Amino acid sequence: MTDRKARGSAWRVVSALFVSVSLAVGLGGCTGIPRDGVVHAGNDIAPDDNPAPVFLPALPQKDASPESILRGFIDASSSPENNYDIARQFLAPAFQSIWDPTVGVTVDNGSGRTLTVIDDATTTLVAVTPIAEVDQSGEYREVDASPVPLRYEFAQIGGQWRISAAPDGTVIDENTFNDVFSAQPVYFYDPGFRFLVPDLRWFPRGASAPTKLVNAVLSGPSAWLTGAVATAFPEGSELTADAVQVVGRQAMVDLNSEALNADRQTLQRMKAQLVASLPRGLTVEITIDQNSQSITALESGAPLVDPRVDARALVLRGDEFGFLAATGQSITALDGLSDTIAQLAPTAVTLASGQASAAVLARDGVYVVRAGDDPKLLDARAGLLAPSIDNDRFVWSVPANDPSALVVYSPTGEATLLPTPWPEATSIAALKVSRDGSRLIALLGTGAETRFVIASIIRTGAVPTGIGAPVLLASGGGVGRDATWIDELTVASLSTLPSGEARIVVQQIGGVSTILESSLSSRFIVGSNSVRDLRALTDTGSLEVQRGAGWQARIDKVTLLATQQGLGG
């Protein structure tokens, strides 16, 4: 490797250490709409089964200058093997056990770093500009920050320069970060134990990853999901050993005696939760205080993970409502629903999971339509948004000019005004409940700004009773038009820029955001089962789909593009 490449590698990992100041924010909630955040073009997430890259950073060189020691330390900080053993060798002996690289990671773009030497070469300041942060629990958050100075101090030990003080954590450029770290959702249950709800975490690849993932499950969900999801593990459950042993493709998880409080069904749910949370292909054996447990698969009611929808577009075209054929222009009607929905001349439809009921926005308000029944008007207020409907058949409805007036209608039609956590919002362009029913996204206006947020749904039994503190997602700026769920971890927003151009931003919840090439006149977007299957409806009624790097018209004269909540249910 040339010296230039070595130096480039060093600065890609430029010491990570602004984290201790800023990572405490994480994805935690706050009162009102959070205001920090920015769109960054993100790299694809590495598959779970990618092998951990092998980094062989150099050891400290004899008679190296403070600058060389600093560069070597930064380079070595990219390798977490053996508790960052090589990086610690650049530290003074008294500081080796003090420095804590695990408090978090600052991710920057690797450019614009500056180094300033002060105090006769005994102190160096390194400035980095973070674009994202990962905290100790593996939660990732995009940020928009100014350059941050990191202070390193040096001392001579036996005539050799070593680092005697440095910030905790590590700083890594985004390319190296995507090589070293891997994203994996850990899962928690919805309150009814029907769905597994993802909570994305980022940890270094390698042998320690299963241990970190299991500990993440045992430690509970991210702050913003607290109160909306449940865990199968009894309170106080912990690992009895420092590491989860993986033998072949089986993860050996030994829990303390607190887990003895679990009955047979709870043990089955614990195992299902761990299997979903570990990388694909791993099985799980749970023991308690080294005593084996006979845990069979759930006999009934296995939880759903990442509910799917019908891959066909659901549209209203002329007087026909139904699924558009994959080839051609024929439409397949929904038995007991399509004719009734079409007769309402709707402007928006959300089809419930199971495809036997729908929430419909028509000229005179929001209706619920059930197969074989007459439509029932639920909400006659003016200026309503496209309604949402959850797995328990509660219909969510809110006026576009009054985001605080969110009303939820029970299956029997009882209306409840639900408190909202965005008091400063003056308008709302979209509100969509996730397919697992535990989360919602909202595209809000606050004066001249657009804010795209996600929040948890608090329930008592099946009844929605509150919304958690919102977490800011990336948006495209401009005027918010629409938003949609793509899968359990991916959402998208559509906005119109001052130039008139439409912009679609895809956001992985707890991960990176990406600006998509957008159709110029898109006005509505609807997710399917992947980013590539995202659909757009233009203001001229053209249904457009992604082809290569752009969009292509699929069919014209489409009045509306409907949202689906799932196949089952």
Image (cartoon, rainbow, N blue to C red):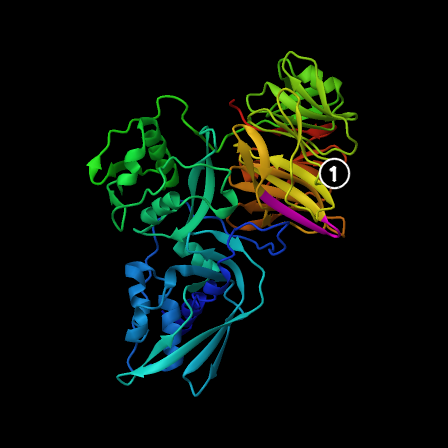
Q: Which residue is mark 1?
A: 400
Front residue (pair 552, 99): 99
Residue that protrudes farthest toward the bottom in the picture: 120
Residue that protrudes farthest toward the left in the picture: 291
Q: Which residues are magenta?
A: 446-454
The image shows residue 536 at horizontal and vertical percentages of 66, 37
Q: Quadrant location of residue 98?
A: bottom left
The image shows residue 87 at horizontal and vertical percentages of 33, 68
Q: Quadrant location of residue 527?
A: top right
Residue that protrudes farthest toward the top in the picture: 372
The image shows residue 356 at horizontal and vertical percentages of 59, 18
Horizontally, residue 94 falls left or right of residue 140, namely left
Residue 145 against residue 408 in the figure, above or below: below
| Label 1: which secondary element | loop
> For the stretch drawn in magenta, what is the main secondary structure?
strand
Horizontally, residue 485 falls left or right of residue 427, namely left
The image shows residue 106 at horizontal and vertical percentages of 47, 62
Horizontally, residue 45 falls left or right of residue 325, namely left
Q: Residue at x 60, y 42 (%)?
A: 492
Q: Residue at x 30, y 37 (%)?
A: 259
Mark 1 Cα-neighbour bin, 10 Å: few <14, some 14–19, many ≥20: many
Horizontally, residue 111 falls left or right of residue 498, namely left
Q: Residue at x 59, y 50 (%)?
A: 472
Judge whether residue 467 is colored magenta: no
Name the residue type under label 1. Ala
